[in-house]
Amino acid sequence: MKQTRLQERYPVFTLEVEKQETDFSTTDEIIAYLKQCVDGHGVSRFIAVFDHFSHTNGLKNGWIDESILDAKNIVFCFGITLPNPEAMATRPKSIGVVELADRFVITFLEAPMPMANSTMESWVRSIGDRRELSTARTGTQV
């Protein structure tokens, strides 16, 4: 997983997972898995799935790079405190999943709460570990 600055100001975490490195084959499967992670977490709450690909594709002047096959965000919140009105600017959270021909690109913005960052990083990293887990459970090479 790498951390970069988008437009020189937004801290973004990115993980690229080659399709042969995971047992997920579609964006929807990854989003469903992430929803299970959100639902199973003691603090996070699922809000929605945003189909960014369909949204942009439906706009009169919308443009999508030809390499992008699908793009969705899962939206959720970790907000365990509301210390001031400005905290609302950092909420909710989302994880973006983009499908390309040979890989998935999963991204999220750095959160001001370390627990949220480590949790999202763990969820995202596990997407690439899925093939290894399947192989370990069955004892077969995939």
Image (spheres, helix red, strand yellow):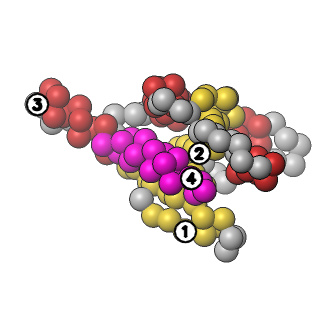
Q: Which residue is mark 2?
A: 96
| Type of amino acid at the residue the image marks with label 4 | Met
Q: Which residues lie in the magenta part?
A: 110-129
78 sits left or right of 118 in the view: right
Identify the element where label 3 is drawn: loop
Name the quarter where the C terminus is drawn. Answer: top left
For disc 3, the neighbor class at 10 Å (few under 14, some 14 to 19, many from 20) is: few
Please tell me whether mark 4 or mark 1 is closer to you in this view.
Answer: 4
Q: Which residue is mark 3?
A: 139
- Specify the farthest residue to the right: 60
Distance from label 4 to label 3 (Cα)?
Answer: 38 Å
- Specify the farthest residue to the bottom: 8
For disc 2, the neighbor class at 10 Å (few under 14, some 14 to 19, many from 20) is: many
Q: Are marks 3 and 2 in contact (CB under 8 Å)?
A: no
Position of residue 42 relative to residue 116, above or below, is above
| Of pointers 4 and 3, the one earlier in the residue sequence | 4
Distance from label 1 to label 3 (Cα)?
Answer: 37 Å
* Residue sitting at x 18%, y 34%: 135
